[in-house]
Image (cartoon, grey):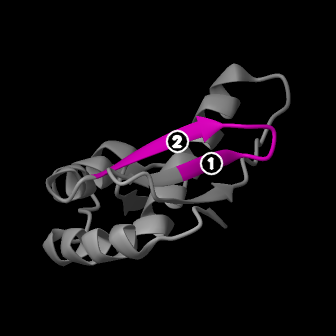
Amino acid sequence: MNKSETISKLATALVKAQSAMGSAKKDSNNPFFKSKYADLAEIISVVKEPLLKNGISFLQIVTESGVETTILHESGEFISGVTPVVVSKTNDPQALGSAITYARRYGLQAMLGIPA
């Protein structure tokens, strides 16, 4: 985890934002495992409004290490963490895109404590 020198304003705002967040609904189907899951759009829909109302935004950038999720506060304070991107097939853009989406979904859920 990486963070700004102080995170007191971010921490206060994040507590308020998380109190307004619910669980993500498992509305998407995974035919391979015959299961349901909360997709990235659902995770974002659960977190976006509570974050913005409390002066918080997030960025997700693909790096050589994986997807770096950064939680930013309007004060300039931040926390970030990296979720590895594990690709099932090399040289397959579809597999890479899927792995990036997977890492974005789980990284955001982990950073914000969102159950699915």
Quadrant for the N terminus, please. bottom right
Q: Earlier in the sequence, mark 1 or mark 2?
A: 2
32 or 16: nearer the viewer:
16
Q: Residue furthest right?
A: 90
Crowding around mark 1 (Cα neighbors within 10 Å: few <14, some 14 to 19, many 20+) is many
Three-letter amino acid code of the residue under disc 1: Glu
Read off the residue under disc 2: 60
Q: Position of residue 103 (x, y in %)?
A: 59, 50
Crowding around mark 2 (Cα neighbors within 10 Å: few <14, some 14 to 19, many 20+) is some
Read off the residue under disc 1: 68
For image coordinates 36% across by 54% down, the residue present is 75
* Majority secondary structure in the magenta region: strand
- Res. 50 in view: yes
Report which quarter residue 62 is drawn in: top right
- Res. 27 in view: no
Q: Position of residue 66 (x, y in %)?
A: 72, 46
Three-letter amino acid code of the residue under disc 2: Gln
Q: Secondary structure at mark 2?
A: strand
Q: Secondary structure at mark 1?
A: strand
Residue 91 drawn above or below residue 36 = above
For image coordinates 46% across by 58% down, the residue present is 77
Residue range (magenta): 56-69
Q: Are marks 1 and 2 in contact (CB under 8 Å)?
A: yes
With 86 as the anchor, is 74 left or right in this view? left
Between the C-alphas of marks 1 and 2, the distance is 5 Å
For image coordinates 16% across by 51% down, the residue present is 49
